[in-house]
Amino acid sequence: MSVQTPITMRPPVAPVPLRQDFLGGLFVTAVAVLAYWLAADLPAGTLGGMGPGMMPKALALLLGALGLTLLFGSLWHFGERIRRWSIRGPVFVFGAMIAFGLTVRPLGLVVAGPLAMMIGALASDEVRWGETIVSVALTSAFCVGLFKLALGLPIPLAPWLIGY
Amino acid sequence: MLDLIGHLGLGFSTAFSPTNLGLCFLGCLVGTLIGVLPGVGPIATIAMLLPLTFKVDPTGALIMLAGIYYGAQYGGSTTAILVNIPGEATAVVTTLDGHQMARKGQAGIALGIAAISSFIAGSIATLVVAAVGAPLTKLALLFGPAEYFGLMVLGLGLAVVLAQGSVLKAVIMVVFGLVLSTVGTDLETGDERLTLGFAALSDGIDFAVLAMGVFGIAEVLRNIENPEARGVVKGAIGRLLPSAADLRRSLGPILRGTGLGAALGILPGNGAVLAPFASYTLEKKLADEPSRFGLGAIEGVAGPEAANNAGAQTAFIPLLTLGIPPNAVMALMVGAMTIHGVIPGPLVMTRNAPLFWGMVASMWIGNLMLLIINLPLVGVWVRLLKVPYRLLYNIILLFCCIGIYSVNNNPADVFFTAVFGGVGYVLIKLGLEPAPMLLGFVLGRLMEEKLRQALALSDGSFMTFVERPLSAGLIVCALVVMLIAILPAVTRSREKVFQE
């Protein structure tokens, strides 16, 4: 739940391109345009016999209209300024997930788990390597024990070493 | 009445088999373990732990999932009390007085009363589910496509009203969810829709992938950015069992909270979210000294916790009787049931009677187990919470990866989860609350199917929704709900409720 800034402390009005609702409206409208464009070739059919394109197109138009309402509303209604973005967190978190997805099949959990955690550790700017290595080792061992040995999930363990 | 006893008897004999008892225990334990992690609410927990149930028979799997669900709920309350971080929206209220109690050295009592009120509420709600289930199933048989459609419109309307923040944004998120639900193969013609050519999307976006991305990964990203606002309660937890005076003071709030929660939980559109807020407001109004609220009043923990748990449980009613998931957690249950070949809906009760009643009975057993395992294990949870977030998020991340990979054994799901994590992060930054999107997504497919069926039957005339009295009633309710949401007076009091 966001803490409301008391009126007396309200920060100066943000310029239009930095307003949360302006960018939000832009984002939503872009999604609507993309959805409509992707559905463009699908036949809409009639109301009594709807084709595959009817719902996606109708919903995309509705979403676009709502997005534009939000966007134009932000010109009059000031709203909040866009929140600070960070690059480091998303880059390393997504990097860790991609590394996991790429390595889990060929190299198994024994490699993919620690690899993903080592990359993921970089996402925080408070990273300390000593404790990270200990936690990576413990967590990986726990995961192998729980998911593989106890539950027998068909996730590869170390195909290059033991064949599964 | 005799029927009810017979049904519950069947349920308890199913649930008390050693295997099912063990699964219920395991589910509660692991659910609490993951649910305690800060920022991981029931949705992410269930999505993460879904693969744990794959090897078990359907009845056992659902019993275990229900255990995971209650465990995650309870874990959320634990984090709310000890760290002041709500695992999900419904635990927000618990932070108010629960964390204050913890600061006054009564952490144990707060945790104890949370467990006890959850147990009492759960026991009563189990009876409600058992009693209401059968008649509602009969009603469901009267439902045609038009009625189903009307009910889901009502559900989405309620979701908009209950969402935090602006109504326009909530509507946007619902429609966004509906758009996402159209991705995949068309049910009637088999055409690929909006798949961008990805084979993995031809079955549609997997709900677990979407939920994990938006609620698991995006939440991790948000928490990394706002480091260590957490103050884990230092010092002793104190005794766990509330005194007789505490219990006497809590009994009224517990019973009233249970009533509120049970009633709101049945509503489609995640009515259960409102239950703790409603209970807190009610208790504050009824209290002799309302000023104690917010400073560690035990009623402020007992009432909302009871309401939360009762709502969480009666939310199974629309799912099991009508096949309509009222919230995101229940949507994951649908996914889990489908994986095990059980189609949620009115037929579950007749075709899979042991499964249905076994699950109802296991709800009660699950609540009892939570009471038994959590009170002694509180110390373990506290120690877990003292692990700094810079280590915890990484563990959460790996669990997410393994969980999501295991749902379909498909590495592509991990990539899609990352994509939706990115979408969720953008939405958070743009001030667009993702919860209504999930409900739109959940109901979208079924809504489209029912709309198409209804309009095919009526030859394209929308009058079918008005001519049939039941569906007309539902549509009118939905319109009234939407109108209420945009009335200025209600808008103001909504803001007030969510700020408190």
Image (tube, coloured by chain):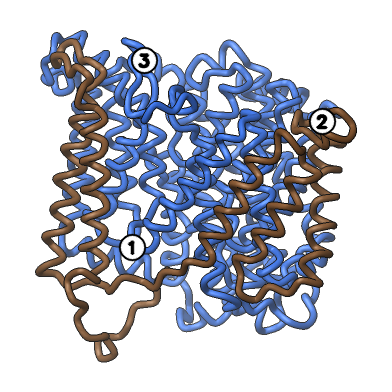
Chain colours: A brown, B blue
Compute the Cα span from label 1 to label 2. Answer: 41 Å
Compute the Cα span from label 1 to label 3. Answer: 34 Å
Please report, as a chain letter, where disc 2 is located: A
Query: Can you give x and y, in whole percent of width and height, for residue B206 in the image?
Result: 49, 32
SS of the residue under disc 1: loop
Callout 3 crowding tier (Cα within 10 Å): few <14, some 14–19, many ≥20: some
Residue labelled with disc 1: B431
Query: Can you give x and y, in whole percent of width and height, for residue B162 in the image?
Result: 34, 53
Residue B224 shown left or right of residue B402 in the figure: left
Asked if labels 1 and 2 share a chain, the reply is no
Q: Quadrant of residue B358?
A: top right
Query: Can you give x and y, in whole percent of width and height, for residue A147 in the image?
Result: 79, 39
Callout 2 crowding tier (Cα within 10 Å): few <14, some 14–19, many ≥20: some
Residue A152 numbered mark, or none: 2
N-terminal-most mark, 1 or 3: 3
Q: Quick one: B219 or B307, which is closer to the camera?
A: B219
Residue labelled with disc 3: B187
For the residue marked with disc 2, what is the amino acid?
Gly
Q: Are marks 3 and 2 in contact (CB under 8 Å)?
A: no
Say above or below: A125 vs A25: below
SS of the residue under disc 2: loop
For the residue marked with disc 1, what is the amino acid?
Gly
